[in-house]
């Protein structure tokens, strides 16, 4: 990959370093952006299938209720405590969006729906889907713009390179911060 990719209003200077302190999501986004538009599309498809903590809690509660009812029916009536316990966990999650199961699934590597949505929106913004945020890959037809400028149309104002340079991590951090607001 080119060390100095000039794409729209960002210059991606170099591949992201694995030791960046911004967190796992920022690293994944920066690496995906550096890999190109096809990698962004692939990552968005992966995010569509990613299980959230909420989904895992609901499925776990449903399975435990069914197993508990079956065991209570065929083994011992005391197994009804299992569906009762998981019904309480589900109620706790529904009311507060936080429960002991949330912490457990978070430790197992699942993320909340808002975290996944932030990553999805950040990738779309860096791909160029939103014009009011910085882009990593410009979708404009450069030849058409050059023809328009050559015919006396819109002329781009010169911008100093130090004003538009941003590393992958800086661009990702800026967009993530904007998305979370």
Image (cartoon, rainbow, N blue to C red):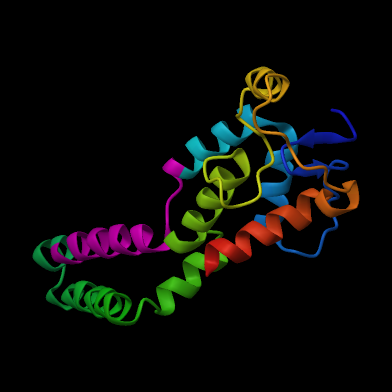
The answer to which image quadrant residue 65 occupies is bottom left
Query: Which residue extends farthest front?
Result: 152
Q: In front here: 30 or 132? A: 132
Q: Is residue 127 left or right of residue 79?
A: right
Q: Taking the image as drawn, is residue 31 in sight?
A: yes
- In the rendered image, residue 51 lying in the magenta stretch gets the answer yes
Query: Which x, y percent locates residue 18?
Result: 83, 51
Q: Please state, as top left, top right, bottom left or bottom right, where the N terminus lies in the image.
A: top right
**Is 178 rendered above or below residue 157?**
below
x 73%, y 37%: residue: 156
The magenta segment: 48-69
Query: Which x, y percent locates residue 101?
Result: 41, 73
Q: Taking the image as drawn, is residue 112 in sight?
A: no
x 54%, y 61%: residue: 179
The answer to which image quadrant residue 87 occupies is bottom left
Q: Look at the magenta stretch and give its main secondary structure.
A: helix
Query: Which residue extends farthest left?
Result: 73
Query: Which x, y percent locates residue 105?
Result: 48, 65
x 77%, y 57%: residue: 170
**What is the total number of numbered labels drawn onto the structure image?**
0
Q: Is residue 17 left or right of residue 25?
A: right
Q: In front here: 25 or 59? A: 25
Q: Is residue 113 left or right of residue 174?
A: left
């Amino acid at each position: 990959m080119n060390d100095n990719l000039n794409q729209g209003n960002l210059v991606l200077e170099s591949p992201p370093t694995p030791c960046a302190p911004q967190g796992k999501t920022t690293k994944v986004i920066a690496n995906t952006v550096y890999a190109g538009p096809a990698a962004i599309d692939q990552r968005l498809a992966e995010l569509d299938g990613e299980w959230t903590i909420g989904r895992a809690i609901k499925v776990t509660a449903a399975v435990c209720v069914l197993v508990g009812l079956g065991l209570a029916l065929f083994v011992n009536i005391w197994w009804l405590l299992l569906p009762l316990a998981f019904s309480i966990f589900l109620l706790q999650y529904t009311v507060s969006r936080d429960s002991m199961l949330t912490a457990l699934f978070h430790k197992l590597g699942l993320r909340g729906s808002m975290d996944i949505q932030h990553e999805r929106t950040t990738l779309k913004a860096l791909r160029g889907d939103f014009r009011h945020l910085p882009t990593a890959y410009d979708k404009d037809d450069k030849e058409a713009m050059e023809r328009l400028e050559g015919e006396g149309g819109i002329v781009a104002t010169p911008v100093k390179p130090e004003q538009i340079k941003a590393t992958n991590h800086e661009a990702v951090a800026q967009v993530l911060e904007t998305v979370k607001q």
